[in-house]
Each structure stands twice: as C-alpha cells, then as structure tokens.
Image: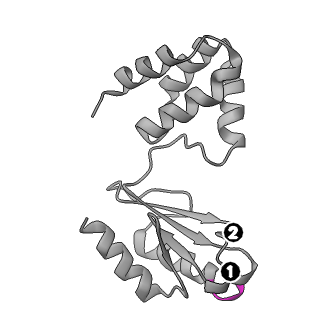
Amino acid sequence: MLQQAEILESVLERYPSKPEYLIFMLQDIQADCGYIAPESMEIICEHANVPITQGYSVATFYQSFRLEPQGEHEIKVCLGTACHLKGGERLVENLERKLDIHRGETTEDMMFTLNTVNCLGACAMAPVAVVDDEYISSTTPAKLDKSLKAAQQQ
C-alpha cells in the first residue's frame, strides 16, 4: 500500500490548483486513505487555493467525509421511523456496551466503527443494520453478534 505522502502527491498531480476541485481532491484522499488527515487537509487546501476553514466546512457538511480513522469494519444501524419503532435504538445501545464505544466512534483495536443513519431504504426489513456491505434484516443482537464474528474472521 502506498504511503500517505505518496497518495497525496498522486492526488495533487491529477487536479489543477483551483477551488472548484476541492471536493474531488478530498474524495480521492479519503478513498485511498480511508479518511482525511489534518496534514492532508492543509496541503489540499493550499493546493486548491482555499482557506483551511473552507476545507473543513466542506468536509463537515457532507456526511460522506471522515476526519478520523475508521475501523476495518463499519457497522451502520438504521434509526429511521420503522427501525426506531422496531428496536433500532436498543440495537445501538447493545453495540455500544458490547464494543465499549459510542456511536460515531471506533474500537481501540481499529476493528469496528459504529455509526447510525437516518434511513437505509429498507423499511420493510426493519430493524436494519449493515455490517460492511451486508444488510441484516429483522436485526437482533444475536444476528449482529454472528455478523461481527464473521467480519473479524475475514
């Protein structure tokens, strides 16, 4: 795997030094590194000729950007109306206890990141959770445990 400095250099070579390319550069860094490190943000903003505050404004406005390293496996629990009514919040609370983290955090071993979402577009399967790209319908703590164990063995 490329070092972060090499990745950053590669991204900067692909884009002109113009503000309109800021989002594209941030997307590429995140795609290659998994998140946008503060050093990368500074260099990208300098290259795009925008203040660093603008870079952070963009990165915090769009939920797809991450400013912290993420776990090897992402867990998303839906808290939309149908999922909430069918126990989505209890699933999150159970995961927080089990993994010893809060929503939006990553375990110390960098294995799991726990996130909540407003909708996964699968209301008929409520409550729904996603481990990596695997949708778990009618999710229960036991089903989640099984998926987490499978993810750890990959």
Q: Where is residue 36 in the image (x, y as percent from the top left)?
A: 51, 34
Label 2 neighbour load within 10 Å: few <14, some 14-19, many 20+: some
Residue at image mark 2: 119
Q: Is residue 29 above or below residue 139?
A: above
Q: The N terminus lies in which quarter of the figure?
A: top left
Say the numbered circle drawn on residue 123.
Answer: 1
Of 69 and 16, the residue lying toward us: 16
The kind of residue on which mark 2 rests is Cys
| Residue at the image position 50 percent from the left and 18 percent from the top | 14
**1 lies left or right of 81:** left
- The residue sitting at the front extreme is 14
The kind of residue on which mark 1 rests is Cys
Q: Position of residue 140 (x, y in %)?
A: 50, 88
Of 74 and 16, the residue lying toward us: 16
Q: Does the magenta stretch include residue 105?
A: no
Q: The C terminus lies in which quarter of the figure?
A: bottom left
Question: Can residue 120 be seen?
Answer: yes
Q: In which quarter of the image is residue 17?
A: top right
**100 lies left or right of 1:** right
Q: Where is residue 133 in the image (x, y as percent from the top left)?
A: 46, 65
Q: Is residue 85 magenta?
A: yes
Q: What stretch is highlighted in magenta?
A: 83-87
Q: Magenta segment, principal secondary structure?
A: helix
Q: In this view, does 25 lie above or below 106?
A: above
Q: Is mark 2 on a helix, strand or loop?
A: loop
Label 1 neighbour load within 10 Å: few <14, some 14-19, many 20+: some
| Residue at the image position 24 percent from the left and 68 percent from the top | 153
